Amino acid sequence: MKPLQLSTETALKLSQKLNVPIEQLMHMPQHILIQKLMELEKE
């Protein structure tokens, strides 16, 4: 599976918001990432 196509800036913001290391974020399956973003939106 290829890494997510994110800009460094976006990846940094996401890793801070989701509280995950940036390396972990880059290897996260896209559907899981989207799911986490949806959860953040609800809060």
Image (cartoon, rainbow, N blue to C red):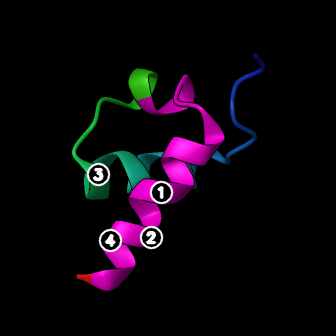
Does residue 30 show up magenta in the picture? yes
> Would you name the residue on which mark 2 appears?
38
Please give the label number shown on residue 21: none
* Mark 4 crowd level (few <14, some 14–19, many ≥20, 10 Å Cα): few
Residue 18 is marked as: 3
User: How far apart are the two marked residues, 4 and 3, measured between alpha carbons?
Assistant: 8 Å
Residue at mark 4 to residue at mark 1: CA–CA distance: 9 Å
In magenta segment, residue 12? no
Q: CA distance from mark 3 to mark 2?
A: 11 Å
Highlighted range, magenta: 25-42
Q: On the image, numbered disc 1 is attached to which residue?
A: 35
* Residue that lies at the very extreme toward the bottom in this rendered image: 42
Measure the alpha-carbon separation of dots 4 and 2. 5 Å
The residue mark sitting in front, 4 or 3, is 4
Secondary structure beneath dot 4 equals helix
Q: Tell me the mark number nearer the camera, choosing from 4 and 1.
A: 1
Residue 22 appearing in the image: yes
Q: Which quarter shows the C terminus? A: bottom left
Contact between marks 4 and 3 (CB within 8 A): the answer is yes
Task: Estimate the x, y position of residue 26 in percent, counting from the top left.
Answer: 55, 29
Q: Are marks 1 and 2 in contact (CB under 8 Å)?
A: yes
Q: Nearer the viewer, mark 3 or mark 1?
A: 1
